[in-house]
Image (spheres, rainbow, N blue to C red):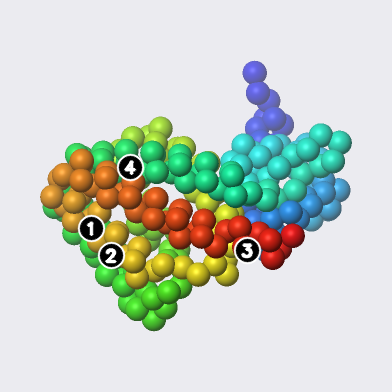
Amino acid sequence: MPTSRDEARGLAAERLASELRQDILDGRLLPGARLGEVALTERFNVSRGPVRAALNLLGEMGIVSIVPNSGARVRVIKRQDAQALYEVREALEGKATELAAKNNGAETGRRLQSLLNQHASEIRARPDGAYLQTGGDQDFHRVIAEMSENSIVQRYLSRELYPQLALLRVKHRHVTGRGAAALREHERIAAAIADADPEVAGLLMRRHIRNSWKALEAQLSENEEETE
C-alpha cells in the first residue's frame, strides 16, 4: 500500500516531468540535449528518485530517450520514426474526426469555424509559414479529439502522439510551412463535421494528415543532412 512518502515522491516526479516537458516542447532543451541526473537534482533541489521517475515518464511519452549506462537525452526523432508517427496520427485522428461528426453536428461546426476564423488572420500574415497553434482549446486537432468523446483515443493522442509531434516541430522549426493550404483543409473538415457526415469528415482528415506528411517529408532529409 502506497505511503504518504511514496505519494509525495510521485507528485514531485510529475511536477518535474511537467516542467521538463515544457522546456523540451518550447525548445529550451533541444533534441539530443543530455539530461544529467546530478544537474537535475541540483536544479530542482530533489533526490535522484523523483528525477529518475520524471525521466521515465517523459520516456513513456516518447520525448526522452534513456540508454542504459549512458543516461537520458532529449529524443532525436529520425525520419523513419517521423513517418511512423504520421501513419498512427492518420489512423487515430481519422477515427476521432468520424466520431466527432457522429456525436455532434451544426453547433460543433460553428465552434470549429469560429476557431478557424481566429487562425485565418494569423495565416494571412504568413501564408507560407507554419500553421502554429497555441494548444489546448485553440488547437483544431485537439478540439476534434475532445469532440470524439472517446477517452482512449484522446489519451493516446494527448499523452503520446502530440508531445512527439511537438518535439518533431522543435527540430524542424525552420521547415517551410503550408499554412494557407492547411487552413483550407481544416475548413472542409469542419464543414463535414457540421453536416454530421462522418465518412467524408474522416476521409478529409486522413487526406489532410497525408498532405502534412508529404510537405514535411519533402524537406526532412535535406534538413537532417544540414544538422549532422
Q: Which residue is mark 3?
A: 223
Position in image of residue 145 (x %, y %):
35, 45
- Where is mark 1, residue-wise? 188
Kindly check if marks 4 and 3 are in contact, taking CB atoms under 8 A apart as contact.
Answer: no
Given this view, does label 1 or label 3 mark the residue nearer the observer? 3
First in sequence, mark 1 or 3: give its number.
Answer: 1
User: Could you say where residue 124 lies in the image, as x and y percent from the top left?
Assistant: 35, 78
Foreground disc of the pair 2, 3: 3
Mark 4 Cα-neighbour bin, 10 Å: few <14, some 14–19, many ≥20: many
Residue at (75% x, 55% y) in the render: 33
Q: What element does badge 4 sit on?
A: helix
Quadrant location, the C terminus: bottom right
Q: Nearer the viewer, residue 111 or 75?
A: 75
User: Which mark sits nearer the N-terminus, 4 or 3?
Assistant: 4
Q: Do we see residue 137 in this rendering?
A: no
Pointer 1 and pointer 2: residues touching (CB < 8 Å)? yes
- Cα distance between the residues tagged 2 and 3: 26 Å
Dot 1 crowding, Cα within 10 Å, few <14, some 14–19, many 20+: some
